[in-house]
Amino acid sequence: MSQIDDIIITRGTGNVFEDLGMPDATERQTKTRLAFAVNEALKVRKLKQREVAEILGIPQSKVSVLKNYRLDQFSVERLMEFLTALNHDVEIMIRPRTRAGVGHIAVLAVQ
């Protein structure tokens, strides 16, 4: 935290959900990033909702839920399955932490 002319600036953690004090911040961020990748893949393909529902194996009503980032209905695993159904590879890499403290989870998209 720093102060410049009576303006207090607080550096964020890099996870907006954590900054907002949500208890499941890591899961929310992971889901949001996965859903963003799914929605970007769908945008590129320019599919109708019924086509998306068929490809992802979900009811058409859930396509709207996904596109609006209401992600409490989807698990991290399910979102990864959506990506593979859209011809994307999902890789999980586990490595020792190089800095002190607890490890973290990151979702990185490669274009």
Image (cartoon, grey):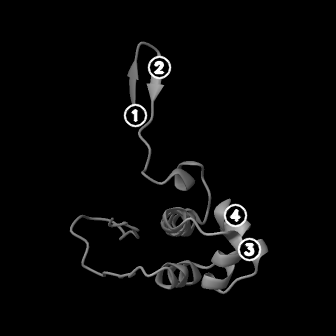
Q: Earlier in the sequence, mark 4 or mark 3?
A: 3
Instruction: Identify the residue at image location x=61%, y=63%.
Output: 23
**Of marks 3 and 1, which one's residue comes earlier in the chain?**
1
- Coordinates of residue 52 in the picture (x, y in percent): 64, 76
Q: Nearer the viewer, mark 4 or mark 3?
A: 3
Q: Position of residue 111 (x, y in %)?
A: 33, 65
Q: Residues within 10 Å of mark 3 (few under 14, many from 20)?
A: some
Residue flagged by tag 1: what amino acid is it?
Answer: Met
Which amino acid, mark 2? Ile
Name of the residue lying farthest toward the left: 98
**Picture layout, residue 101 above or below residue 2:** below
Q: Could you tell me the amino acid type at mark 4? A: Arg
Residue at the image position 62 percent from the left and 57 percent from the top: 22
Element marked by disc 3: helix
Circle 3: residue type: Lys
Which residue position is annotated with label 3? 62
Tell which residue pokes out farthest to the right in this image.
61
The residue pinned by badge 4 equals: 70
Q: Nearer the viewer, residue 55 or 74?
A: 55
Gap in Å between the C-alphas at discs 3 and 1?
41 Å
Circle 1 residue = 1
Q: Which mark is residue 68?
A: none
